[in-house]
Image: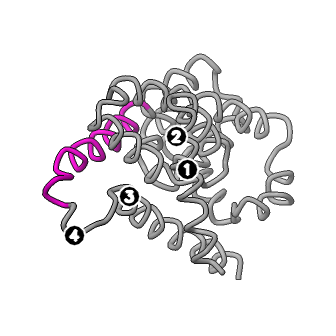
């Protein structure tokens, strides 16, 4: 059951980007940054693969990915500002947000201050939830958007570049794989499996 869900998520991500192009990247990265763990480890490398085919540009996917991150982070910020932690603790389980995820984001923000918004955007898992404690702390919105955009741009560019470079060597890899996006989906699926199992382990 879990494996089918993972395959479906990966296939949906690939279909959205293939159909909507840059707009699909904005949409998917917005979801990923709105405290919903949609793996950017699938989204951006697949976009990078399309760069290698000449269908997109590396700068374009990095910019649209960062824009999506900002758009998705703003609702999470205001959720933290007006709803507070109790609201997320009540409904977070429906999007696989555990108490440990919130504790981790709160701890990072309390320890490192506002600059952690930039740092967290370069880290798996933490990046998805860091906007919420920023809202709870009522961080200055201009700083929040700036740090979110710059950190997200770097993250999206690195993942996109990795997908692009791998795609450039597709001719060397095709004897081993039927289609390159299956490789990206497999890597992302590993991340999703780890995240889902971690979530249920934390809840137990």
The secondary structure that most of the magenta stretch takes on is helix
Residue farthest toward the left in the current orientation of the protein: 172
Label 1's element?
A: helix
Task: Identify the magenta region.
Answer: 153-173
Q: Quadrant of residue 8?
A: bottom right
Residue depicted at 80% across the width and 59% down the height: 89
| Contact check, label 4 and label 3, Cβ < 8 Å | no
Magenta residue check for 168 = yes
| Contact check, label 1 and label 2, Cβ < 8 Å | yes
Q: CA distance from mark 1 to mark 2?
A: 6 Å
The crowding category of the residue bearing disc 1, from other C-alpha atoms within 10 Å (few below 14, some 14 to 19, many at least 20), is many
Q: Which residue is mark 2?
A: 17
Q: Position of residue 85 (x, y in %)?
A: 79, 50
Quarter of the C terminus within the rendering: bottom right
Q: Position of residue 93 (x, y in %)?
A: 77, 64
Residue depicted at 52% across the width and 54% down the height: 39
Magenta residue check for 50 = no
Residue depicted at 55% across the width and 21% down the height: 143
Closer to the camera in the image, 140 or 53: 53
Q: Is residue 146 above or below residue 169?
A: above
Label 4's element?
A: loop
Residue depicted at 66% across the width and 77% down the height: 200
Q: Is residue 85 above or below residue 174?
A: above
Q: Which residue is mark 4?
A: 176
């Amino acid at each position: 059951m879990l494996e089918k869900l993972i395959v479906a998520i990966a296939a949906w991500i690939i279909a959205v980007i293939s159909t909507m192009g840059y707009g699909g990247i904005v949409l998917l990265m917005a979801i990923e940054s709105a405290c919903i763990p949609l793996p950017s480890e699938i989204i951006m490398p697949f976009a990078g693969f399309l760069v290698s085919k000449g269908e997109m540009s590396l700068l374009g996917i990095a910019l649209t990915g960062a824009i999506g991150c900002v758009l998705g982070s703003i609702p999470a910020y205001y959720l933290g500002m007006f709803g507070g932690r109790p609201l997320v603790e009540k409904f977070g389980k429906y999007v696989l947000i555990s108490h440990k995820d919130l504790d981790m984001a709160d701890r990072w923000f309390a320890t490192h201050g506002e600059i952690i918004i930039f740092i967290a955007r370069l880290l798996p898992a933490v990046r998805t939830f860091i906007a919420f404690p920023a809202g709870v702390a009522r961080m200055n919105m201009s700083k929040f958007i700036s740090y979110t955009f710059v950190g997200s741009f770097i993250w999206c560019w690195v993942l996109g570049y990795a997908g692009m470079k791998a795609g450039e060597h597709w001719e060397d890899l095709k004897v081993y794989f039927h289609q390159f996006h299956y490789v990206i989906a497999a890597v992302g699926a590993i991340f999703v499996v780890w995240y889902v199992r971690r979530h249920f382990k934390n809840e137990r």
